[in-house]
Each structure stands twice: as C-alpha cells, then as structure tokens.
Image: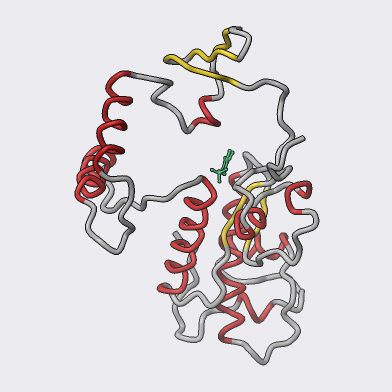
C-alpha cells in the first residue's frame, strides 16, 4: 500500500543503485538501463565528476529562485547557445513544461504575424505530456479521457504524411486570417480537404463549396501564399 498517487502503472521492480548505464535492484540483480529515466538521465548513474559537482553545489547553495541572478545558470546557457547556435535557453523542470513553453512561443509567433487564432499542427498517436495543454496536444484518447474540456488550437495530422501537414498548416492559416476579415460570413464553418488542396495549388478556391469567398484574394489585393 502506497500513498503515491496512481498516475502510472509501475513495474514490480525498484532500483537501489546505479553505475554508468547499469542498475541494481534490492536483490543485487543487475539490469542494463536502456530507459535512462525516459531519456533524461543521459549522463548515466554515479559518474565521479558529476557526483562531486553536485555534492559541492549542495554544500554551497541549493536554490535562490529566479528573482536573482544565477551565475552558473548563465554560464550553462552560454555554453548551450554556443553549441546549438541558438540565441536563448529556457530552463524548466520537465518535458511537459518544455512543451508548454513551445506551445506558448508558437502562439506568440502567430499573434505577432497577426493570426487571430493560431493553431499548432500535432501528430496522431504522439505523446506530449500530461498537463492540460500538453495532453490536449497528445494524440491519445487514453491520456485525455476524463480531463475535458481540452485546450483548443491543435490540428491533428497522420504521422509521416508531409502533405497533410502542409495542408493543415495552410488551411488553419487561411481559416483564421479569413475569419478575422470576414466576421460577417457565417456560412464559413468548414473547409474541405479537396478545397484546401485546390486552393493550395491555385492560390484561391475553385470549388463550389460555401467557403469559396474565404479562399478569394486577400482584401489588400496581394496573392495568397503558403505560410512558412
Ligand atoms: C515525448 C515526450 N514528451 C513529453 C513528455 C513529458 O515529460 P515529463 O513527464 O517530464 O513532463 C514525455 C515523458 O515521458 C515524453 O516521452
């Protein structure tokens, strides 16, 4: 009997110690750690330099919050930026927090591009985490069940189908920008895949559906184009 909340089904094994990529359970049985904490313990277990650095830091200071400057964090960000060629580093505590940040950044980018309701293309069967936003993005009813209402703003496409991905991105872009322009056009509720394909090819709608007006040329007269 445990008081740990039952969020995951756990295998009946507990590990006592580790060394490099090996783990030992309480009976001394050795296991190859191919999971590495679901890929977050890439440094392995118990490396002497890693252990010494942790011991030293814990002896000096554990946490001061992000209200103050954190010299070592800045040093690490500089190293990561230099290695990756990126500009900034966002430090967080979990995979779903990283994905939440990615969702927020994608939405910010959409709003900066004047997209009224930016949507994010996600894959069927993908797993993105268990917070409300990331489970909404996750392509598994099992993970979502019982937590409705989910967060809107995700368009799901099949894995390994680049065309579907391109159509979804293009479709959402036009849907939100046209909706903003044509608020009075109540007829535009759905746009068919055939219409999306045809519009992508021609830059405007040529089918006879009611969404026709939405695919027409933008009011400023510029030709439509696929968003990057
Ligand atoms: C692909 C993927 N994304 C996101 C997550 C969520 O990470 P966390 O459990 O650290 O929030 C996981 C966790 O297993 C994952 O495998």
Ligand 1 image position (quadrant): top right
Q: Is residue 203 above or below residue 88?
A: below
Point out the image quarter for the C terminus. Answer: bottom left
Q: Is residue 45 above or below residue 134?
A: above
Q: Is residue 20 above or below residue 106?
A: above
The residue lying toward the viewer, choosing from 13 and 101, is: 13
Residue in the image at 57% along x and 74% along y: 117
Residue 63 percent location from the top left of the image? 33, 50
According to the image, what is the colour scheme of the structure?
secondary structure
Residue in the image at 50% along x and 71% along y: 224
In this picture, residue 13 sits left or right of residue 44: right
Q: Quadrant of residue 152?
A: bottom right
Residue in the image at 74% along x and 53% along y: 144
Q: Quadrant of residue 109?
A: bottom left
Residue 200 percent location from the top left of the image? 58, 61
Residue 37 percent location from the top left of the image? 53, 30
In this picture, residue 26 sits left or right of residue 74: right
The residue lying toward the viewer, choosing from 124 and 46, is: 46
Residue 71 percent location from the top left of the image? 19, 49
Q: Quadrant of residue 29?
A: top right
The residue lying toward the viewer, choosing from 60 and 201, is: 60
**Seen from this angle, which residue lies furthest bottom?**
184
How many discs mark residues in the rendered view? Answer: 0
The residue lying toward the viewer, choosing from 7 and 208, is: 7
In this picture, residue 202 sits left or right of residue 147: left
Point out the image quarter for the N terminus. Answer: top right
């Amino acid at each position: 009997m445990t008081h740990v909340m039952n969020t995951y089904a756990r295998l009946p094994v507990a590990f006592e110690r580790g060394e490099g990529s090996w783990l030992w359970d309480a009976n001394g049985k050795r296991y190859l750690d191919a999971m590495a904490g679901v890929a977050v313990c890439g440094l392995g277990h118990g490396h002497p330099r890693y252990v010494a650095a942790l011991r030293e830091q814990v002896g000096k200071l554990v946490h001061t919050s992000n209200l103050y400057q954190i010299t070592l964090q800045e040093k690490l960000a500089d190293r990561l930026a230099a290695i990756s060629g990126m500009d900034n580093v966002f430090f967080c505590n979990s995979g779903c927090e990283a994905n939440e940040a990615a969702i927020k950044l994608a939405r910010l980018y959409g709003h900066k591009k004047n997209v009224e309701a930016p949507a994010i293309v996600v894959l069927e069967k993908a797993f993105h985490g268990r917070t409300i936003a990331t489970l909404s993005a996750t392509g598994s009813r099992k993970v979502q069940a019982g937590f409705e209402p989910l967060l809107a703003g995700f368009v799901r496409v099949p894995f390994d189908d680049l065309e579907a991905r391109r159509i979804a991105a293009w479709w959402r872009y036009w849907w939100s920008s046209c909706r903003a322009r044509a608020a009075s056009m109540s007829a535009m509720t759905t746009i068919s895949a055939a219409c999306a394909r045809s519009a992508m090819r021609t830059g405007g709608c040529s089918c006879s559906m009611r969404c026709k007006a939405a695919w027409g040329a933008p009011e400023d007269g510029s030709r439509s184009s696929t968003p990057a």
